[in-house]
Image (tube, rainbow, N blue to C red):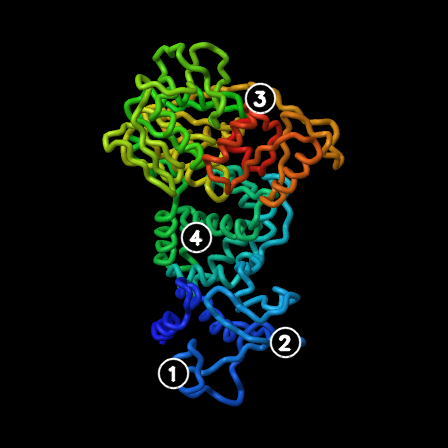
Amino acid sequence: MLHRCRLLLSRSITSESWLEASQIHFRRLRSHTASQRPRNSYHPSETSTSSHSQRTPFEPPNFQRNHVKFPSGFKQEGFKHDGFKRHGFKPGFKRDDFNRGGRFNTQQVKKPKKRHILDGFSVRDSTDALIIMHNKVRKWADLPHVHKRLESFGVPHADVRPLLSKFTQEVRSGLLQDPVEQEKFHVKRFSLTAGELNQGLRLDQILTQLFYSWVSDPERQKYLVESVPKSTLDQISYLYSTADISYPADLYPRARAMRRKVIMHVGPTNSGKTHMALRALAAAKTGVYSGPLRLLAHEIWDRLNKGQIVPLGMDPDADSEPDSTTNMDIIEERVSRPTVRKEGKAKYARECNLRTGEEFRIVSEDAGLLSCTVEMTSFNSPVEVAVVDEIQMLADPDRGSAWTAALLGLPAEELHLCGEDVAVPIVQELLKDTDDELFINRYERLTPLTVQDKSLEGDLRRVQKGDCLVAFSRSGIFALKRKVEESTGLRCAVAYGRLPPEIRAEQAALFNDPHSGYDVMVGSDAIGMGLNL
């Protein structure tokens, strides 16, 4: 039926985008069965069905005709469907009158996230995790989905409750307070934070992991076998050993086969922490740069191919000015022989390919260097030097796994990690089970960053040259830009996340150039990564 309806639509709709119009039409027809809201769905006629001679161009033969129910007080006029335009609606018609099912709702309706049954506790610090686990374990053990999950993994129904009951008794009796047991079950790795978005789900995950490791403990199995068959304990032990990633470094045998030299360059923004790392990359025969943004990956790729980065070990020539427009966190050079040049030179150029989630650029099949976003990092080929930028992102709940994989899995003789100082203890903990050498270089901010004692108090006339203002929406950025320019006469550059990387870099360069005429930056929080101001 569907393909025939689309064929009829293709003949009756004059627009070239008939497929889009057909999808809109069928979403409306489906909405009346899925929605019970009386004002915003199509409702079938209660008295008659259409005949072949009465059907509209949108209806196939023997298809029940539907009629639109308009809001009360709404005058129905002529209606013409061309796939994009609808005529006959009064100017006062409100978009809210069709919350679902119609073309007027152009934004996808987001369903609110369902709360977890274990939600509703507060966390002050990491030590609260043990107390919360102790208090919530009984409620967790009684949850139906916990029982169903065990049964779906092959644990017999009759064995689920006895195991959960004994586990609950041990936790309530002080299992988590015993230092020996904490070490055995790696309790210190479990953490709950006040900023956790899904605290109940996280607690469910922690207790589930602890339960499986507890059942798999040989000492516990000696007395658990009195209550449940050994086959059940073996099944849980098998699942636990299969899913266990307590030692994630072992997932990368190529990197574990070599003793890597890991060099951390840590410091605040605009401290020059990536400077030496990029020069080391430019000097290597094979290497990779892994960054958080397509903007940065593209810039490194461009500069390496043009010869704007002087390789480590080579003397820079005096025929170029230092580059002040870069978004890389490099040392600001005011010398006649810069190592990051404004103009490229063939003797410094290195063939480098580009790989991001949006584009591949192959300069040469034999190119020894690769610039990529961190999610596109390859772990198959050993390299001399690898640079991982913004290493503190390994703690990010959404993208952190990519940085963790790069840290543990890159088979590089020399691995440079650039980022903030907060990442140091995390990196040390992750690398403690490897044979890698770790060196830490700390940097200070090169230009001062000051916080005003008082706010502007709403008076944009007090904005001065060199100021940066942050808004949190695209419309807010341009509204603020217009107000600042009207109030002060200063021209504003803008930067936000969805701005194309090339334009964003150009805007940052205009702000950084004291002679460009752009003296104020208005941006979103995107200025915190990938832009040096």
Sequence-first disc among 3 and 1: 1
Circles 4 and 1, Cβ within 8 Å, touching? The answer is no
Q: Of 144 and 484, which appears nearest the observer? A: 484
According to the picture, the residue beneath numbered tag 3 turns out to be: 514
Coordinates of residue 440 in the picture (x, y in percent): 46, 21
Coordinates of residue 437 in the picture (x, y in percent): 38, 22
Sequence-first disc among 3 and 4: 4
Res. 182 in view: no
44 is higher (above) or lower (below) than 246: below
According to the picture, the residue beneath numbered tag 2 turns out to be: 75
Circles 1 and 2, Cβ within 8 Å, touching? The answer is no
According to the picture, the residue beneath numbered tag 4 turns out to be: 223
Within the image, what quadrant is residue 473 found in? top right
**Element type at mark 2:** loop
Q: In the drawing, does residue 106 fall left or right of residue 274? A: right
The residues tagged by marks 1 and 2 sit, at their Cα atoms, a distance apart of: 30 Å
**Element type at mark 3:** loop
Circles 3 and 4, Cβ within 8 Å, touching? The answer is no
Q: Looking at the image, how many numbered discs can be counted on the residues?
A: 4
Sequence-first disc among 1 and 2: 1
Res. 90 in view: yes
Outermost bottom residue: 47
Sequence-first disc among 2 and 4: 2
Sequence-first disc among 4 and 1: 1
For label 1, count other residues whose C-alpha is less than 10 Å away and answer few (under 14), some (14-19) or many (20+). Answer: some
For label 2, count other residues whose C-alpha is less than 10 Å away and answer few (under 14), some (14-19) or many (20+). Answer: few
Q: In the drawing, does residue 52 fall left or right of residue 257? A: right
Query: Which mark is drawn over residue 323?
Result: none
**Element type at mark 1:** loop
According to the picture, the residue beneath numbered tag 1 turns out to be: 61
394 is higher (above) or lower (below) than 229: above
Q: Amino acid at mark 2?
A: Lys
